Amino acid sequence: MVALALSTLLLGLATLAAFRRWKLIKRLPLPPGPRRVPLLGNLFQLPRRNGWLQFKQWSKHFGSDILYLNVAGVSVVVLNSTDAANDLLSRRSSIYSSRPHAVMLTELSGCDWAFATMPYNDYWKQCRRIFTMQLNPIHVSRYQPQQLQFIPDLLLGLLDNPDGYLHHVRRSVGTSILSITYGIEDRNELESHITLVEEGAERLAVAGSPGAFLVDFLPWLRYVPKWLPGAGFQRTAEENRWYSQRMLEVPFATAKKLAESGMGWPSLVSRGLSSLATEDEPLGEKTLKDTAATVYAAGGDTTVASLQVFFLAMLSHPDVQTKAQKELDSVLESARLPAFEDKEHLPYITAIMLEVLRWHTVTPLGIPHVLSEDDEYNGYRLPANSIVVGNNWAMLHDERVFPHPDQFNPDRFISEGKLIDEDKVLAASFGFGRRICPGRYIGMSELWITAASVLSVFNITKAGKEPTREFTTSLISTPLPFQCAIKPRSEEAQKLIRAAADSK
C-alpha cells in the first residue's frame, strides 16, 4: 500500500514537472526566420534550388544558427551549425530521430521500404540492426576483395574510353555495391541489374528531395487525379512506383537463387538468409529484402556523386593532384596498383577525400528529422512535429571551423604528416545521432580505393570549356556535366592497367 502511494506521488510530481516545462516552453519565442504571411506562411519563400545557400544567408542575416519557417502550417526548423546539430540531433536523439512522412517518396512512389526514410519505430530498428551487423567497421574488410575486383574494369574503361568516365565510375560503384549486397558476380547478370537500379535510385532521389514537391507540404494534393492540369507529379509517381518495386524484388530474387545454389559472392543477403534459420538471429525475409534495397538506393548515387566531385576537384587543382601522385609513387614505386593495406601510408589521399566531402557535400540538406515533442534550445521554442533540417553544406562551409571554406585544400586535414579533424567532416557528411548513415564505413572504403587507383595511373586535366562549380538540386546533389581529359601518366601505367585487367 505504501509502495503504491509512493508510486502515485512520484507519477504526480513527474506529470506536474512536465506540465510546468510545457507551459514554460510555450511562452518562449520561436527562432528567427523570414517574415510569414497568413495561412501560407513561408510557402513561397521556400527555396526550390540550392536551398542550402539561402538557409546559410538567412542564418547570417538573422545572426542565428537556428532558423524557423512555417510552410502552410508545417513547422520547419533549420540547423546551420555543427554545434546545433550535435546538441539536438545527437544529444537529444530520443526526440529527434524520426522522419517526416514523405508523401511523394513513400506513399506515391512506393518507396516505403527504404529504412533511411522510415519513422523511428521497431521495424526501423530491425532493418538498422541487419545493416550494422553486416557493414560495421569490423566487417568492412571482408568486403574489400569485392571492391578491388571491379577497379581494373574501371581503369581499363578510363584508358580505352576516357570521355565516358562517368559511365565507367557508375558501373564500377554499382557493380561493387550490387556484389556486396546481393552476391552477384557474373558480369552479364550485373549489367542487367545495374541499369534498372541506377534509374530507380535517381528517380527516388529526386522524389525525396526536400521542397521538390508541394504534395509533401500539402498532403491533400495526393488525391488530385493525374489527368488534371498541374498534376504531373502523379504521373511521375506512377513511373517511380514501377522502378521502386523492381529495385526491391528483382535483385533479391537473384540473390536468393544464388544463395540456395551455393553460388555467388558472400553478401549481405546470403549472410542474412543463413541467419533466418537460427533462433538467436531471427530475421524476417521482408526485413532483409527492404534493408538490401536500401543499401544501393542510399549508397550508390551518393558514392558516384562524391567521385564526380573528386574528378572536378582534381582537374581544377593540378597542384593537389601532383602532390597526391608523389605520395602514391613513394609507396607504390610505379610498380603496382594501390591496395587497402597501403592506406596508413597514404594520408594525403584520405585528406583529399575528406576535402571532397567537405567542399561540396552531396547531401547538402541531408534527410530531414522530426521532433516528437516540444523542446527548448538557446531560449527558443521548438514546436512538436517540426521538420528539422540539418544544413550540412553550411556546417562544412562554416568559416569559424574551416577557414576559407570555398578553397579546396586537403592540407587542412594534415598536420606533421598525420590526419587530423576527420570527425569534423564525417559528422556533417553522414548524419547525426541515431540516424547516422550505417554505410559510411563501406562508402569511405569505396571512395578511397577508387581515388587512389585513378590517381596512381592517370592525370586528370581540363578539356573544353572551363567547368562551372554548379550543382544539381535534389536529395543527392551532383556537379552539372563537365568535360575532363583523362590520360595515362606513362607507358608503365598503361601496362599496369592492362595487366590488372588481364589477370582477372
Image (spheres, rainbow, N blue to C red):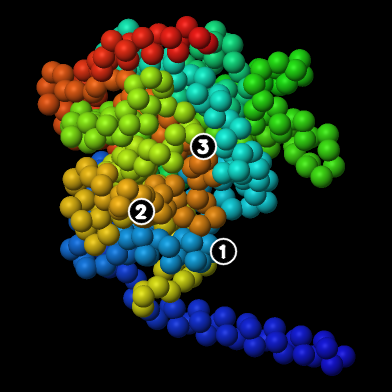
Q: CA distance from mark 3 to mark 2?
A: 21 Å
Q: Residue at x 26, y 14 (%)?
A: 490
Q: Residue at x 16, y 19 (%)?
A: 463
Identity, as a three-letter code, of the amino acid under mark 1: Ser
Tell me the number on the disc at residue 420.
2
Q: Earlier in the sequence, mark 1 or mark 2?
A: 1
Q: Earlier in the sequence, mark 3 or mark 1?
A: 1
Identity, as a three-letter code, of the amino acid under mark 2: Ile
Position of residue 117 measured from the top left corner of the image (x, y, whole percent):
52, 44
Visible residue check, residue 238:
no
Local secondary structure at mark 2: loop
Q: Quadrant of the N terminus?
A: bottom right
Position of residue 388 measured from the top left corner of the image (x, y, whole percent):
42, 57
Q: CA distance from mark 1 to mark 2?
A: 30 Å
Q: Residue at x 50, y 50 (%)?
A: 436
Position of residue 236 measured from the top left corner of the image (x, y, whole percent):
42, 26
Q: CA distance from mark 3 to mark 1?
A: 26 Å
Tell me the number on the disc at residue 94.
1
Quarter occupied by residue 86: bottom left
Q: Nearer the viewer, residue 206 or 297?
A: 297
Local secondary structure at mark 1: helix
Pointer 3 with pointer 1, Cβ within 8 A? no
Q: Residues within 10 Å of mark 1 (few under 14, many from 20)?
A: some
Quarter occupied by residue 337: top left
Q: Residues within 10 Å of mark 3 (few under 14, many from 20)?
A: many
Specify whether 411 is left or right of 463. Answer: right
Position of residue 146 measured from the top left corner of the image (x, y, whole percent):
55, 24
Mark nearest the camera among 3 and 2 is 2
